Amino acid sequence: IAILKWRDRTDYRQPVPTLAISGTRDRLVDPINMQDVAARIPGSRLVEIDSGHESAIECPREVANIVANYLWEHSEVSWEYEPSVAS
């Protein structure tokens, strides 16, 4: 439902950086839908990973690394965190 509502919008004006994570093997929501949504949000980043619909459950470490690295890149605060490369 959320994807259907997003697809009808054309006025994306996100005031903050936006990260979209999509599973390339998602059979519930076609990955092309997430590509479309991300393309409409100025400055967004789409990361596609080899998973189904529940990426955070199927690939928790990879999703955590992607999110942590993204937050690190967009943080104005100095953290005691060393970003890692998602594998």
Image (cartoon, rainbow, N blue to C red):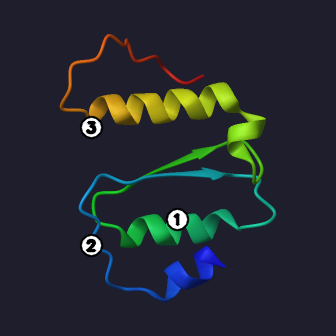
Say whether residue 5 is left or right of residue 43.
right
Alpha-carbon neighbours of circle 3 within 10 Å: few (<14), some, or many (≥20)? few
CA distance separating discs 3 and 2: 18 Å
Q: Which mark is residue 75?
A: none
Amino acid type of the residue tagged 1 in the rendering: Gln
Q: Name the residue located 60 percent from the left edge and 75 percent from the top edge.
A: 2
**Which of the two labelled residues, at mark 2 and mark 1, occupies the earlier sequence position?**
2
| Residue 3, image x, y percentages | 60, 75
Alpha-carbon neighbours of circle 1 within 10 Å: few (<14), some, or many (≥20)? some
Circle 3 is placed at which residue position?
74
**Which of the two labelled residues, at mark 3 and mark 2, occupies the earlier sequence position?**
2
| Residue 75, image x, y percentages | 25, 33
Circle 1 is placed at which residue position?
35
Label 2–label 1 contact, CB within 8 A: no
Q: Residue furthest bottom?
A: 8
Label 1, secondary structure: give it: helix
Taking 26 as reference, is 42 above or below it?
Answer: below
| Residue 17, image x, y percentages | 30, 52
Taking 74 as reference, is 53 above or below it?
Answer: below
Say whether residue 54 is left or right of residue 82.
right
Taking 36 as reference, is 25 above or below it?
Answer: above
Amino acid type of the residue tagged 3 in the rendering: His
Q: Quadrant of residue 15?
A: bottom left
Q: Name the residue located 18 percent from the left edge and 32 percent from the top edge.
A: 76
Circle 2 is placed at which residue position?
13
Label 3, secondary structure: give it: loop
